[in-house]
Amino acid sequence: MDNNDLTPRLEPGLYIVATPIGNLGDMTMRGAETLRRCDAVACEDTRVTGKLMAHLGVRKPLLRYDDHASERDRERLLATMRDGALALVSDAGTPLVSDPGYRLVREAQAQGIAVTTLPGACAAIAGLTLSGLPNDRFLFAGFLPVKEKARLVTLAELARIDATLIFYESGPRLVKSLDAIASALPGRDVAVGRELTKLHEECRRGSAEELAAHYSANPPKGEIVLMVAPPSEQETSGEDVEAMLREALQTAKPSQAAAQVAKATGRDRKELYALAMELRSQ
Ligand code: SAM
């Protein structure tokens, strides 16, 4: 008989379980207990979750899931949680945070199925705590777009937000993103959190230019959280609006540039359009 058979079963429902982002010691006791007592685990990659389960000494059916799963697959999971306890995990960290689960949670709630969460590691929060950047207000913005123009538009949209910005990033794209931040959000303090909770954990702070130079010379390995300080008062002055318009005009027509900057700054679009026409004629 499997040892797991001795553990009392959980109430039926969906249990969202955070898992470590590198250091297995960060598995919470309540999360581990839930994986021990549930009936099945929905996960992104059965090999990755299989390793965590082996570390915990637990064997459960592992059911692959992502938000692109077919309706039939999702219905199968919903049926499992009507009769039994289904744990939802992702490869690492908190499910649903740039990871699958949103549609499953919505559907379970819509069907009156009990849903609960077991919080734990999350790279965005771990990065923020180590960044040395203001943390009283922050905005998690997921991954920046891959295409250069879309990346600049996104940064322009976020430029006026009075909060530390948090992005997930990959090693090969880090320098390009730092370059984009240097041009769209000039003068800001930036922090790069890399391999958090792991052996080679580091957190570097500096200007986007300094960090881009460092990581061009030392291509970064591993997983990365990129953080940008909130705007200074000076940054939201007229001069900076002009700089944002100039930047936007490099890839957009005056009307589009004015609309982008108006959206990002809350300033009047007609005034910005007039300024954009003037800048273009210079
Ligand atoms: N749901 C996860 C969480 O709660 O952190 C995030 C999943 S997202 C698909 C994966 C991204 O998280 C990575 O590309 C990286 O940007 C970030 N990340 C995950 N683990 C990390 C770590 N140990 N150090 C730095 N960043 C990490």
Image (cartoon, rainbow, N blue to C red):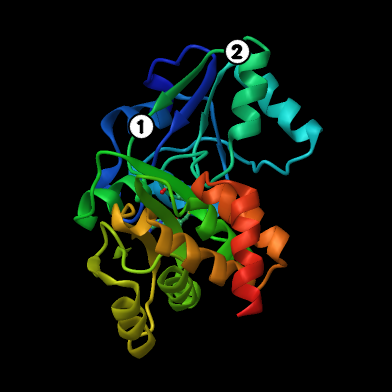
Lateral position of residue 259 relative to residue 89, left or right: right
Lateral position of residue 26 relative to residue 99, left or right: left
- In the picture, the quarter occupied by the C terminus is bottom right
Q: Amino acid at mark 1?
A: Pro
Q: Pinpoint residue 252: horizontal percent, then vertical percent.
A: 69, 68
Which residue matches tag 1? Answer: 119
Q: Nearer the viewer, residue 268 or 94?
A: 268
Give the quadrant of ligand 1.
bottom left
Judging from the image, what secondary structure is the residue with disc 1 in? loop
Above or below 231: residue 27: above
Which residue matches tag 2? Answer: 113
Marks 2 and 1, Cα distance to the nearest angstrom?
A: 19 Å
Upstream in the sequence, badge 2 or badge 1? 2
Instruction: Look at the numbered discs 2 and 1 and tell me whether their residues touch, using CB distance below 8 Å.
Output: no
Residue 14 appears in the rendering: yes
Above or below 222: residue 164: above
